[in-house]
Structure formats: structure tokens, C-alpha cells
Image: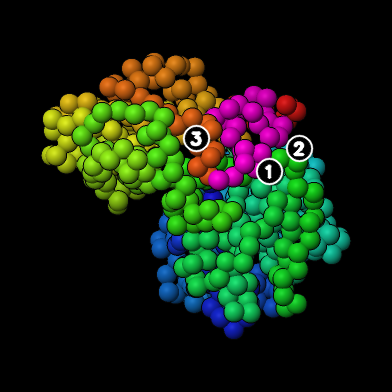
Amino acid sequence: MCGVFGVRAPGRDVARLSYFGLYALQHRGQESAGIAVSEAGRLTALRDLGLVPQVFDERSLSGLHGELAIGHTRYSTTGANAWENAQPLLHHGRVRTVALGHNGNLVNAQALRDEVGKPLASSSDSEVIAALIADDERPLEAAVAGCMARLEGAATVVGLADGTLFAFRDPHGFRPLAIGRLGDDYVVASETCALDLVGAAFEREVRPGELVLIDEGGLHSTQAVPPAERGALCIFEFFYLARPDTRLSGVEVHGARVRMGERLAAESEVEADLVLPIPDSGTPAAIGFARATGIPFSEGLIKNRYVGRTFIQPEQGMREQGIRMKFNPLAEVAGKRLVVVDDSIVRGSTTRQIVAMLFDAGAAEVHVRISSPPVVSPCFYGIDLASEDEMIAAHATVEEVRDAIGATSLAYLSLDGLTEATRRPASHLCRACLTRRYPTAVPGDTAKHRFEAIRG
Ligand code: SF4
């Protein structure tokens, strides 16, 4: 889960545009942020651990000049949360220097690392992509296309090299990437909400397997690798990851989530007094649930939006109160039969604590409704869900999960209900963490042989 951004806009402050683009993509990664610029072909990058406004200030931004820029917000999936893994990374190869930002996870990174045959500065799988392009003697377009053909897994990439901005998606199209117009200039971004913020007009999405090159000649596109027979846009983008104001394949994510809630209400009716979301990701589905049932919607759980990653441990007596760092119930839940709506349950520990907190606050009943099917299998394409052993639903019935989280009742949205709410056919979606049917080869043993692919 990362956010990528790229812009070519000679005469404009491309670093500042990237900064605002990254601000809109902050939800896709909060561990590190960075911007690389290209000025007359010379590359400069600034990246660090932290949120976008912690990494950049007026001074650092005003030192980044160029006609082209790329930006990245990172949430680590492969490789630790360390400075050297922050992106955009700069790789000095035999032929060229490449700045690169990557969203996704490769499933054949180890084999590619061996092939590159030289020590890399980072432990993330993204540097092998940069190294393959930087060491290729062919012109940039052929070098990037050649690299794309060797990648397996999820790769939405933005890069700078040879005075050109390039961007591509893997043939399955796991992660989104949109193109926007800024007058005569071009912007690419993981989500359309970033185009909106910088004032770019949405033009289209980058197609699976398509390579886009942007230089002084404008935008040039080529189908570098054939698209996979079945597309595999991550369905998690629809119910959890993407910002609600983003449009995926023309579908506004908020609307899709409201439809999920409406469908959930139809599939698992319940008598109740109030519908409350677990904010923020459960909110649109809770709105849909309330609309469909006529049960009043309540903001019954108040979220502290300023809780981030903290290294300060609470005092011993506060430990059990941990969840209250994030949520606190309103008095109106007392004596009420509640429907609590969330987008997913992975480990179940947060849901269990929230259910207990609502009963402590006097709730008469707590009916948990989830706007996705049970998450039962890990993701190899860039979402750090958990291992299968840690997933509460992987080897348990719905009733067992209900018992474990302490709810009065529990129901999940059906797979068909979820898919229909996205308005995309199942053949265009990856749903592997819900179905265990993976669209590519996957590592056989996630712990020990991270990247040894087994076709299946
Ligand atoms: S396995 Fe799940 S989280 Fe990963 S890409 Fe597929 S749908 Fe998305």
C-alpha cells in the first residue's frame, strides 16, 4: 500500500505540485515520503521517514527544481520501515540513473535480485525494478518495456530517467493509476483525488500492461506487455484502501461503499435502534445500511483523528484503555440495540475491543455488520494484511468469530454483493484474500521462501 505521483510541467513548481499530490495520497502510506525532480536530465531526490508535512517544509521544497517530478508515500510490505527503503529511490546503473516510486509487491523479486547480480542499497523489492532499467543499454522505452516483461506480481510504477517521466501498471492492473491534464501538461497519480487537489482534469486510467512516457513531445503510450487474460484490480481498494472521493474505473468509491451497506442490510436484516460506523472506513457502508433499513444513523463512536504511530507507551494502568486512544462512545448508545458497521475484520482484536467498549457504555445489543466477506488468506500484492494464522476468520465459522469478538450477532457481506457494489465484473478484480484464488504464482511458504514462485 503506497501512493505514487508524477508530473511534467515546465515553468511550474513541480516539487510543490508533487507535495500536494502526496498530501492527497497520504492515506496510502504514512511511514515515509519523498519527491525526486529532474532538471535538464539531472536527478535530485529528497525522502525521509514520516508524514508528508514532516518530511517537507518551505525550505526543502524550494530546493527542488525541475521540469519533471515524482513522489511517493510508503507503507512497507517488503523491506523494513527504514530510511534506505524510503522512495523515490535513486539507482545509478551502468547506463543511466533512475528515480523510481513503486506501489505493489513483486512475487519474483528474489529471482530478479539474483539476476541483477550486484548488491542493492535497499531491502525493498522496488530497487530491482530501477536496477533492471538503469543497466539496460537500449533506449529508455525499450529498457522499461523489457523490465516490465520480467516482473511478476503487482507493480504500479512512476520513474524519471533520461529527462523523461515514465509510468506503468503490471499486466493484471492490481493497483490503480490515473492520468490527468494540467493545461498542456500531464500528471499521473495513484488516485483521482490527487488529480483533483492539484487542479488536473482526469483524462483516463493507465491500462494494465501499458507504459506511458511523458517528455517534451507530450504523452506517448505503448502496450508494453499484453494485459492479463483476467484483470485483477484489488477489491480492497473499493472497500477499504482508496479514498472515498476517488473514482476507480469511473466509479466513485464512496458510492460503491454506500451500495455495499445497502446490500449488507438486505442480506442480514436486524431489529435495532441505531446504526453506527467504525470511523472512518466503515462510515459510507453504515450510511447505506441506515438508508436501506430506515434505522437512524449515529456517530456513536468518536474517533481521535490525531492518533498516529507513537513510541510513548501508556502507563501500566492505561493499557486496557488502549482502544480509547482512538475511539470513545457517546452516551446515547446506552440502552440501545446497535448495528456497528465496519469494512472488514482481519485479526479481530480491534473489533473485539470496540464491542466490549460499547457494552461497557450500556449498549443492550451489539450487532456487527461487515461490508466485505471474511478475510481468509494473505495478500502477496502489496497489502500487509497478516499471516493466515493471525486472521480470525481463516479457520473459523462465522459463529466462532462472533463468539470471539463478543457480539450479539455478526454478518458479512457476500462476495457477490461486494462485487456487484463495485460495478466491475468479477473477471476484472483480484479477490484472492477472500477466496484463496490467486491471479498469479504465489510464494509457497511466505515465511521462509518469500519469492520462490509456485504456479497455481
Ligand atoms: S489479495 Fe486481497 S488485498 Fe491483495 S490484491 Fe488481491 S484483493 Fe487486494
- Residue 72 can be seen, yes or no: no
> Which of the marked residues, 3 or 2, is nearer the chain's N terminus?
2
Q: Position of residue 45 (x, y in %)?
A: 59, 65
Q: Is the residue marked by circle 3 packed among few (<14), some (14-19), or many (20+) residues within 10 Å?
A: many
**Which image quadrant for residue 445?**
top right
- Residue at the spot 41% in from the left edge and 46% down from the top edge: 258
Q: Horizontally, is 146 left or right of 55 in the view? A: right
**Looking at numbered disc 1 in the image, what kind of residue is underneath it?**
Gly
> Which of the marked residues, 1 or 3, is nearer the chain's N terminus?
1
- Residue at the spot 75% in from the left edge and 43% down from the top edge: 228
Q: Which mark is residue 231?
A: 1
- Residue at the spot 26% in from the left edge and 28% down from the top edge: 271
Residue sitting nearer the eye, 193 or 132? 193
Task: State the colouring used for the structure image.
Answer: rainbow
Magenta range: 423-446
Q: Which mark is residue 417?
A: 3
**Looking at numbered disc 3 in the image, what kind of residue is underneath it?**
Gly
Quote the CA–CA distance across marks 3 and 2: 39 Å
- Residue 78 can be seen, yes or no: yes
Residue to which mark 2 is pinned: 111
Taking the magenta stretch, the answer to whether it contains residue 437 is: yes
Residue sitting nearer the eye, 320 or 62? 320
In the rendered image, the vertical position of residue 374 relative to residue 51, given as above or below: above
The residue at the far right in this view is 138
